[in-house]
Image (spheres, rainbow, N blue to C red):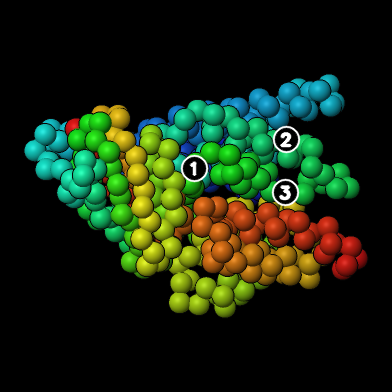
Amino acid sequence: MKLFKLGVKTYMIVFLSVLALFNISHMGFVVIKQTLGVVFFALILDSVIIWLKEHKLKFSQSACISGLIIAELLTPHQSWPIYVFAPLFAIFSKHLIKISQRHIFNPAAFGLFLSQLFFPTGLAWWAANPVFLIIIFGLFIVYKMKRWELILGFLLTASLLFKGNLYLINPYFMFFMLTEPKTQPFTKKGRIIYAGLIGIFAFLGLALISNLDYSIFGLLLGNLSVPILNKWLK
Amino acid sequence: MKTIIFLFTFIFVSAAFAATQHQHHQTSTEELQKDVKDYIPSGELKEGVREVNLEAFQYSFKPDPIVVKYKENIRLLAKSTDVTHGIGIAEFKINVALPKGKVKKIEFVADKKGTFIIHCSVYCGFGHGKMHGRLIVK
């Protein structure tokens, strides 16, 4: 069927948009304004940078996904600089912080992390509902990407560490952020270790750092381990 | 073409569902606004500061709503009774993590009138996105 031949990024955009719409019920329309604003700004900024580098007008799906994730995690009703700086940090990290032509950090996670450092903001993860829908969408994305090892590696480590608090494993994070393709190791073995490391770093983040999101913290440290894993497991 | 139609239908159905849910939400908010004047301020006044004990647990805050008077100095003594939670009130630039069992003191001036949403700012489980409380400044 033609529908199943769409790219993973297209599915991600559709699924994340559907999640945003579903959550209007308990968040109000303010989250749609927030989502449209952040996505629009991320897309424009990304296309300006692409135009400066390649002299081509292009709107990338990855910038749209980063914008959607940032908007869906940020607490609503904040002052406007947060909605500008979070996508700005994300898109700059994507284009500027690179090793071997690949960006190191998950752009959305990087933007949110710096926003948490500079502004007094927590992450509401308001679109991380309903869980059953996230699991259905997430399993489909992982099936399309064929990256089961990431989910298994993360689940195994996080289950061991979080033990009685398994509900702290965030399905939105696991399916839509952990699976970001450009920041993963090249080999299957590398991806298992990478996912496991993120579980460990997230656990340490929860135990040691109170004002930063522990999943985001774990993911960024995990991203840093990728060049080492790629070199080690070549 | 079929793909586009499918995707549009999918998003449209979700939007329609969300809109019906939002209507219900709006009604509740209107009901709340009507009764704001009837709420009694939470906690107690101690040397000119309104002190409110606030508990966070999966997936609520207690008391909800917290009711204070405009221009009052507020001191929230907040704690979590189960896992780590957070208190986020964007309009008052508050973002404080609440590790289980520790009491955190949060002080601010209620210098804006209205009903403000208190979000849990640390992912605390499957119901995290719906963990809200309200701060009413009247």
Q: Is residue A110 visible?
A: yes
Q: Quadrant of the N terminus of chain B?
A: top right
CA–CA distance in space, label 2 to label 3:
11 Å
Q: Are marks 3 and 1 in contact (CB under 8 Å)?
A: no
CA–CA distance in space, label 1 to label 2:
20 Å
Quadrant of residue A108 within the rendered picture: top right
Q: Quadrant of the C terminus of chain B?
A: top left
Between B71 and B137, the one nearer to me in the picture: B71
Q: Are marks 1 and 2 in contact (CB under 8 Å)?
A: no
Q: Are marks 2 and 3 in contact (CB under 8 Å)?
A: no
For the point 62% across and 56% down, the residue is A217
Q: Amino acid at mark 3?
A: Phe
Q: Amino acid at mark 2?
A: Phe
- Name of the residue lying farthest toward the left: B38
To the question of a shared chain for discs 2 and 3, the answer is yes
Vertical placement of A153 versus B135: above or below? below
Residue ID for mark 3: A105
Residue ID for mark 2: A92
Label 1 element class: loop
- The answer to which of marks 1 and 2 sits earlier in the sequence is 2
Relative image position of residue A95 (x, y in whole percent)? 78, 36
Quadrant of residue A54 within the rendered picture: top right
Q: How many marks?
A: 3
Of badges 1 and 2, the one in the foreground is 1
Which chain letter matches label 2?
A
